[in-house]
Amino acid sequence: MITMTAPRTEWIKTEELTFDQEEVKKVLESLDKNQEFTVEQLLYYPYYFFEYKLERRSLLQPKGGGSVGCAMDAVNKVGSVIDKSPVFTEKEVPSQQMIPVELEETEAKKLAVDFLNHSITYRMKILAPPQMKLTRSEIFYRPYWVAEGTKAAPDGYTLIVDAISGKYHPL
Amino acid sequence: MSSDAIIFIIYLLILMIVGIYFSRRASQSADSYLLGDRNIGPAVTAFTMQSTSMSGFMFLGGPAQAFQQGWFAIYYAIGDAGGGIVNLTVLGKRMRRLSERLGALSPIEYLEKRYESAAVRIIGGIISIVFLFAYVFAQFIASGKALESLTGLPYSWALIIGVSVIIIYTVVGGYLAVVWTDFFQAIVMLIGLSGIVIMGLIHVGGLSGLNEQLAQIDPTYLSMWGKDLEFYGQWGVVLGAVLIYSIGYMGLPHVVVRHMSISSTKEVKNAVLWTAVYNQLFAYSPYIVGFIGIAMLPNLADPEMVIPTLAYTFFPGIVAAILLSAVMAAIMSTSDSILMQAGTILSRDVYHRFIDKKADHGRIVLVSRICILLAGIIGVIVAINQPPSVFALVIFAFGTLGNSFLVPYVCSVYWKNANKVGVVSSMVAGAVTHILWTSFDWQSATAIHPFLGGLIVSILAMIIGNLFGTPPSEPIQEAFEEAKGPRRLPKNIDKNVARDIGPEARSISDFLGRTPVKE
């Protein structure tokens, strides 16, 4: 007798898709007219999101301090500045679609502060780094489509497509 | 104070107001500074970056070189204009594939990952500093000269004032650094430069007229071997001149601030194309102006004053003053970015890594600022006592970079067993040879351009050093083989690959390899 078990699922914070399967397929096929794509797998990639309020230290820094966000790649430990406070939605997804987290939150926080300090002092050209106060901290998953070219190797290739921004990269 | 100096001050004030206005209007938070160029589009970004990063050289160094060497100087422009193309075609494909595979975000990080050695990154960083300081010293000298012609002050005073303004601007000038002010300046500079080229060519009777006049003054100005046939038969010098810019770019120490957009970026951005268009349009102009200078300003004492002098010759005083103000402001903008990069590398990769591992961020910033101040003081002393020419410094800087990084990059994709000992030897030997070859003028004795000399030594060091290292690990060898393979991606797909999600792609690839999933 064969028993069917439902795949394990988890509730995660993620962002609403901007690019659905059809749109990804259409865009890629318009870029490569000799290829058809199957876009079936959606994977969720983990990031820590930290938001800090900047406290003004001198007249030369922006009035009101402002805030700055950082997404820390929870696998590769690479930081990114986030342009505005993101809105996450809760979603239940199969665990097998989630890339496993490899970075602990405490280390992620430390790396995020380093990354932001570096970015702020480099780009803002200020004398002293501003004080940063953590105002938001959570783990979220960004959806990536796996788009597989249907042609056999060597002409076929696979891309991951960021389902929010539409950026892509070969695998 | 002369009226031109007043125009300069007014110009700076306007820039400051524009900067403050845009930064306040855009947002009151830090991210508008960090991501200021996000919504601007590829054309403006490429345009702004290229023009502001080349300001001092474009307006003072390039014309001076052409003024002294004649058409021989165009070799450098060919390398400059073709640099991007050489990078993309010769090395580009394999390097890009390997870089994607390794998930590297910057050229130096790529080397570190390919050769599996933090030492490569540190040495690469230190060599970059030599480049950055030489380049910024060139900007200092250029600022002194631009200010000298604007204010009429003696060179040394103009230099001290210019550098002081740059240092103050670097440390507190965040507001001025908004990309729109840079763009505004780029427009003024480029219109000005184009105006000078057009007016100049009209004056001398077009390119043919220009060449006739050059031939009358001295026919060797038209020679491919340089004025007075200085480099006659010296292919080593010619080859070095062409290669230097085309390759030097690869070693530029990029500081990458990666950002993630929350909203979608549906439009296809193509800054590379714009950069190429820009390079083709403007790489040659400074040299043409230099040739016009030979014809129109035969008695000019300082070759680097070709553009300031022609500006006052062709345009009303106020227009010339605005143009020179833009040049000066752009030099400031260029200098502060370079100083900031050098300060960051010194404080983070040298001080924090070797001297005080426990230093907090405040201390690191302080060290970085002290380095910037010291660089300013040393720069002023060098520029006053023994001012080298702007173009000599820029060529020196690019040569050092090229000699350090060319062999490591080529071997990274064409020599599977190239290892870290080989690459470190090659980088150090290449840089040191270039510095010594230039400092002691070995070119005169050997008829070989310092760049070519450095290249030969760098290759030898790579081969010999490699004997003492262990072969690269298996994953690196696999990645190497993969990068060699046939081109996987069609052109249209390839040109829009987002390199910044390379690390994610690598992890997803590993994940899929372990547990293939289907929704």
Image (cartoon, grey):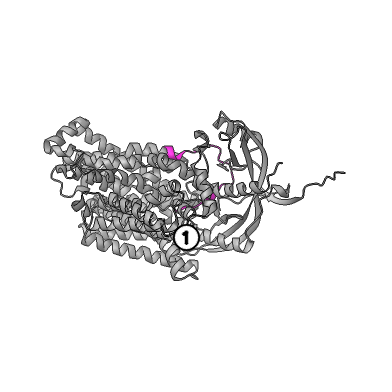
Examine the rendering and report whether any part of residue B134 can be seen. yes
- Residue at coordinates 62% horizontally, 64% vertically from top-left? A106
Q: Quadrant of residue B355?
A: bottom left
Residue sitting nearer the eye, B101 or A132: B101
Amino acid at circle 1? Ala
Q: Secondary structure at mark 1?
A: helix
Q: What's the residue at 29%, 39% (across, down)?
A: B284
Residue B28 seen anywhere in this rendered image of the structure: no
| Residue B32 x %, y % | 50, 51
Q: Position of residue B276 (x, y in %)?
A: 39, 38
Q: Chain of mark 1?
A: B
Magenta part of the chain: B255-273
Residue placed most toward the observer, B169 or B357? B357
Which residue is disc 1 drawn over?
A: B118
Image coordinates for residue B177, horizontal then vertical, percent? 42, 52
The residue positioned farthest toward the front in the image shown:
B467
Q: Position of residue A132 (x, y in %)?
A: 55, 63
Q: Is residue B272 magenta?
A: yes
Left or right: where does residue B313 sit relative to residue B494?
left
Q: Quadrant of residue B157?
A: bottom left
Which of the image's four quarters has the N terminus of chain A? Answer: top right
Does residue A44 appear to the left or right of B378 in the view shown?
right
Name the dominant secondary structure of the magenta segment.
Answer: loop
Seen from this angle, which residue lies furthest top? Answer: A34
Whether residue B75 is in magenta: the answer is: no
Q: Residues within 10 Å of mark 1 (few under 14, many from 20)?
A: some
Task: Kindly identify the residue that appears in the image at 37 percent across and 47 percent down.
Answer: B249
Residue A162, above or below B375: above
* Closer to the camera in the image, B475 or B176: B475
Q: Looking at the figure, which quarter contains the C terminus of chain A?
A: top right
